[in-house]
Amino acid sequence: MKNITLSSIVIIGILLLFLAASGCITTQDDPKLEPVSEEYYAEMDAALYPYMQSVDEQMKDITASVWNAARELDGVPKKGQAVNLALLKLKSEIPLAYDVERIDEHNILTAIAGELNTSLQVGDEIITNQYTEEDFRAAGSQCIVSTHTEFQTGNQGIKVSAPIYDAEGNFDGTLQVILDGTYLFSGPAEELRTTYGYTVWVAQENGVVIYDEDAYEIGSNLLEPNAAYTPSFMAAANDILENESGHTSYIFYTIDWHKISQTNAVWSTLVPGYGPTWRVILIDNVPPRHELIEPSVTPEELKAFVMNAYVYAQTKGKTAALAAFNDPNGEFIDGELYIFAFETDGTILGLPYQPVLIGTNSWFAEDPSGVKYVQRMIARAQQGGGYVLYLAPNPSAGYSTELKLSYVIPIDNQWFIGAGLYEHTAPISHTVSVDWQTRNELIKQVRTMRYLAAVEGIPAVTEMIMDPTSSFQREGLYPFAITGNGTILAFANNPAIVGTNQLGTLNSYGMSFAREGISLGKSGGGLMYTLAWDSGKQKEVFVLDYVEPAGNDTYFASYMILE
């Protein structure tokens, strides 16, 4: 499903008229809907069921963990080490959690286990999703699940809340967990696309889209006017919102917006807890994977292309440079290469093929694995420039998700430019997808290390990293610890480098695994891709790495191999 956020409706309308006038998109009447057999819909239903089950099981595990943790905090003072450890432990159990918060009965934050760069501080009032004792009484023994929300930190997602009571049984506030709603759906969705050739979008009963493959569409409302909606799509959307399950077909633009075609859909309803219900819609509007082709541009040529644009921007100035970069027929378009530009706060300045997104903020944009690729590009630019890896849909390969290598460089302290090429033949592009369950275990492993460090100390955890029988070891995951100056404290997969400084060790892209990981850890932690040397395979391999700060200028991390 493709839709456009409200802030872009007018621009989209103008753009569609322009494209139609120029012959870039179809101007004929909508084609008539072709009949679809019950057998075909039944096949789609069969693919929808396991997807629904995986999301439902995740939510049941999450709400159970939140409820149990709240019961353990009953009668515990609102502040102190006991609360801080309880929040860290809960966060280690929920890999989708951004923040875990203890909030008093007056909606004041008393403790938080969240990202270091969060804008929230103990003592702040929590103004989103305020719940009363009466709300929890109505929910009974269920957690309250919020509607899709933009939180005070700027993150968008879902909040799961449970009540906490004092020693006398009086209402004493809440335990709240903010979830990355995008990855709740996108992890299983990537598996769905790979296994069955379908994809999904998800909406609340009130019409708000809470998941779409295009993150820019999340938060828009199906019930509000949109220049991109066809009459048949509006009829289908109303049918979906009014009925708990069913099947339908509608005419809509293909993913490249160049023509319109029939999309077939089946849907069902998921109840994640006390609160909203979700319509989960499976569709067959998924382009087939294209044949593998050799990359037509080398990393060196990519860098040279960006450096040429850098010289232009320094010579001509920002206004002239952005005009040139945003010209889809200009000199900075070369095959699959084009220049993009961002402010260092994530605001988009240049995207020649997606002009409706210029001016929007993409700070929280993430790829199908949860890598916040714009934040990674900003960090790389602030280091002076270099290569960044992430997953992105490739228009020239039927919008299949492929590994993308971008080169970025700052123009000044306020904005930067870059360009990217698709690594068509990389295993992660076509033969390997990021297993969402292993990805979740990766995050849980590192967060468990962080929790244990708070309980037993960092030296105890570094000993556990080197012990293959320790409780947090998992097959296929490779934990390590590193200091802020690049010294490896523990690394079971390559004991020979323990005690050495790895800042100067570079991979084939000139990227320092150590430097990039430390940078990520200092920003609060998260996911990133890189090429790392595998001593067992005796070659470089693509990996997904997760990093969190452990305190005392120490960072815990682990990675999974993507080959």
Image (cartoon, rainbow, N blue to C red):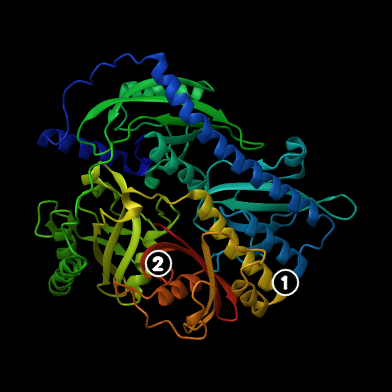
Q: Position of residue 63 (x, y in %)?
A: 67, 45
Residue 455 has which mark?
1
Note whether residue 80 is visible. no
Seen in the picture, residue 215 relative to 361 is either above or below; the reply is: above
Q: Is residue 23 left or right of residue 106?
A: left
Graded by Cα atoms within 10 Å as few (under 14), some (14 to 19) or many (20 or more), the crowding at tag 1 reads few
Which residue has dot 2 on it?
Answer: 537
Quadrant (top left/top right/bottom left/bottom right) for the C terminus: bottom left
Note whether residue 524 is visible. yes
How far apart marks 1 and 2 lie (CA) works out to 36 Å
Label located before the other in sequence (1 or 2): 1
Give 443 or 230, whichever is nearer the viewer.
Answer: 443
Q: Amino acid at mark 1?
A: Val
Total label count?
2
Q: Amino acid at mark 2?
A: Lys
- The reply to whether callout 1 and callout 2 are in contact (CB within 8 Å) is no
Give 368 or 241, whichever is nearer the viewer.
Answer: 368
The residue furthest right is: 168
Seen in the picture, residue 245 relative to 375 is either above or below; the reply is: above
Seen in the picture, residue 432 relative to 32 is either above or below; the reply is: below
Q: Is residue 481 left or right of residue 308?
A: right
